[in-house]
Amino acid sequence: MLTKLSKCPFKQPIIKVWGKFYRSLRKSCSYGEMNLKYEYSGHCELSLPWNRTMLKIKSDVEKKTGFEYNLVLLNFYESGHANIGAHKDDEPSLDQSMDITTLSFEVCRDMIFSKKGCKSVRQALEARSLLIMHDQKERTHAIPPQPCVKEPRISLTFRRVWSYLKQSLDELEHDYSIPPC
Ligand SMILES: O=C(O)CCC(=O)C(=O)O
Ligand SMILES: [Mn+2]
C-alpha cells in the first residue's frame, strides 16, 4: 500500500506558526469533494477529486467509525525528522460533530496528547491502526521528532468540512450581524 500511497502528489505546505511562515517538514496532499474550502495554519488546502483507492479506503473507514467524511488529508513523514507540532484541529471549516479518524501506514510513530493541567499521554500509532480523535477543543496532539526512525510513515486523516457555500453564508452573517444594543 505504501508504494501506491507514496505516489500521491505530496507537497511541503507553507504554514503559519506563531505569526511566522515556515515550510513544513512533512509533506501533504488531500482528496475530497469539489465544493470544499479547507484552511489550516494560514494554508489553503486544494483537494484533488476522489480516486478509486481513496474512495475504497474512505468507505472502509466510514463502515468502521459510523462517520461520513468528505475530505482526507494525507501526511508523508519521510523519516523521524519530519514532525507536526502540538495543535488542535478546531478550524471553523471543520464539522466538529464528526471526529477526525487517522489511519496509519508503515513505520510506527508516536502521538502526544496534551491537556491543560493533565499529564501528557504518548500513544504509538502502529501501521494499519485506526485512531479516532475526540475532544479537539480540549486537547492538543503532536507527532514529535523521533530522529532514530529512518523509515517513512503516511497518515490518512479523514475529516468533514463544511461546504464553501455554508462557510460563505456564515461569514456574511458574521460580517452583517447587528450588534446587541
Ligand atoms: O499524522 C498524523 O497521524 C496526524 C496528523 C495531524 O494531526 C494533522 O494532519 O492534523
Ligand atoms: Mn491534527
Image (cartoon, grey):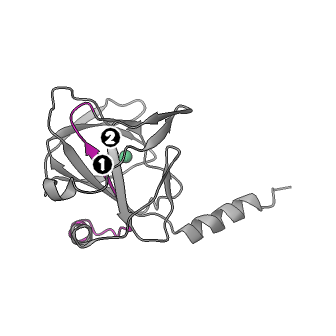
Q: Could you tell me which secondary element the residue under label 1 belongs to?
A: strand
Farthest residue in the top direction?
A: 147
Q: Name the residue under label 1.
A: 75
Q: Circles 1 and 2: CB distance less than 8 Å? A: yes
Query: Which of 70 and 88 lies nearest the eye of the viewer?
Result: 70
Q: Name the residue under label 2.
A: 26
Q: What is the three-letter code of the residue carrying label 2?
A: Arg
| Residue at (76, 61) in percent of width and height | 177
Is residue 61 magenta-colored?
yes
Q: Residue 164 appears at what percent x and percent y? A: 55, 67
Mark 2: C-beta under 8 Å from nearest atom of ligand 1? yes
Mark 2 or mark 1, which is nearer the start of the sequence? Answer: 2
Where are the magenta residues, as a range? 60-81
Vertical arrangement, residue 100 with respect to residue 139, above or below: below
Q: Could you tell me which secondary element the residue under label 2 belongs to?
A: loop
To which quarter of the image does residue 72 belong?
bottom left
In what quadrant of the picture does the N terminus appear?
Answer: bottom left
| Residue at (22, 32) in percent of width and height | 80
